[in-house]
Image: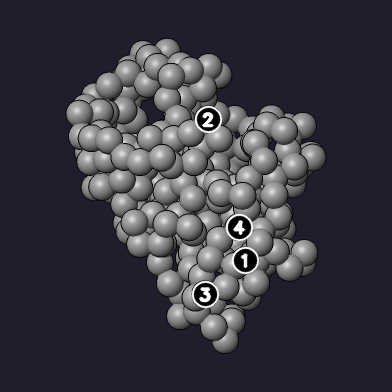
């Protein structure tokens, strides 16, 4: 049976044994459950009320991902400044783009699908005009999310984007993913170089408090296993060559499909930057 309902600004989509909550105004997933087991960590109700994206289950990142060194980048011979981060939980550099904090609107809705759109912020930090859209669908075999970026500007601009899911820790969790290179990061999350990362994530336990790295050369496929609950989630991300793995000492861990890596706007093609004409 499929259906939806509204409750405390959260739209709930259901299909068979899957249930997904979406906060449309935030453009964020608030929970994802299968057979009453949490796949994503459930959102903090206080975070939803305060529209704090750090307390949700998954949010979109655009028009850049991760951090930007000194909140500045060069493009076509010009230097552009972004708003530095003011949240003490995140450090001092601009991070994760704009759309994770900007308001979203519903453009289309059905029992099993929700389409959302978001425009740039009004502070003028990002100098180009765009529309970011995402669709959230409960399919027969799981959850499908599609993220896209359309330019409304008369000039090309660089971009990266991705998704930031928070997986629930349920006993032991393991990750399988084929990657090639791991970024060596500074204490502020800035890339200092790369090392061979191909030996990682071959059905490896995601240990608390030891992982916060971005991997390049990802095949776009990964498996997150919930060992104690005897099920696994297969992730397929088209067009994403980078995988961020973040495992703090908390009740969640993050496996983030991305088109670019940290400080990509200052690294160009090596960082995964693409140009939107």
State the residue in front, 42 or 152. 152
First in residue order: circle 3 vs circle 4:
4
First in residue order: circle 1 vs circle 4:
4
Which label sits on residue 80?
Answer: 1
Q: Is residue 266 shown left or right of residue 139?
A: right
Label 1 secondary element? strand
Is there a contact, CB below 8 Å, between mark 1 and mark 4? yes
Residue behind mark 4: 72
Which label sits on residue 77?
Answer: 3
Distance from disc 3 to disc 4, alpha carbons, whole Å, reads 13 Å
Label 3 secondary element? loop
Percent coordinates x, y for residue 215 in the rendering = 33, 40
When the figure is inspected, residue 243 is found, relative to residue 149, above or below; the finding is: above
Percent coordinates x, y for residue 37 in the rendering = 47, 25
Split into 4 quadrants, where in the image is the C terminus? bottom left
When the figure is inspected, residue 192 is found, relative to residue 37, above or below; the finding is: below
Would you call the spot at circle 1 few (<14 residues within 10 Å), some (14-19), or many (20 or more)?
few
Distance from disc 1 to disc 4, alpha carbons, whole Å, reads 6 Å
Which label sits on residue 187?
Answer: 2
Label 4 secondary element? strand
């Amino acid at each position: 049976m499929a259906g939806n309902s509204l409750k405390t600004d959260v739209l709930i989509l259901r299909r068979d044994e899957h249930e997904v909550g979406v906060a449309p105004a935030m453009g964020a997933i608030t929970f994802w459950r299968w057979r009453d087991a949490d796949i994503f960590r459930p959102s903090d109700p206080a975070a939803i009320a305060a529209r704090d994206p750090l307390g949700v289950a998954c949010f979109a990142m655009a028009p850049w991902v991760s951090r930007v060194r000194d909140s500045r980048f060069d493009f076509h011979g010009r230097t552009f400044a972004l708003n530095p981060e003011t949240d003490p939980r995140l450090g001092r550099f601009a991070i994760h783009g704009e759309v994770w904090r900007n308001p979203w609107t519903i453009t289309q809705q059905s029992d099993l699908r929700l389409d959302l759109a978001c425009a740039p912020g009004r502070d003028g930090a990002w100098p180009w005009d765009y529309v970011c859209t995402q669709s959230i669908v409960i399919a027969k075999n799981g959850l499908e999310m599609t993220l896209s970026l359309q330019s409304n500007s008369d000039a090309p601009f660089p971009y990266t984007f991705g998704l930031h899911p928070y997986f629930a820790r349920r006993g032991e969790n393991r990750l399988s993913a084929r990657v090639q290179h791991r970024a060596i990061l500074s204490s502020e999350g800035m890339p200092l170089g790369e090392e061979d990362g191909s030996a990682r994530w071959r059905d490896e336990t995601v240990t608390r408090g030891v992982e916060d790295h971005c991997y390049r050369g990802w095949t776009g496929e990964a498996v997150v296993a919930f060992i104690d609950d005897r099920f696994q989630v297969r992730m397929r991300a088209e067009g994403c060559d980078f995988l961020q793995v973040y495992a703090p000492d908390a009740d969640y861990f993050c496996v983030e499909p991305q088109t670019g890596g940290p400080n990509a706007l200052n690294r160009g093609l090596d960082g995964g930057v693409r140009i939107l004409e």
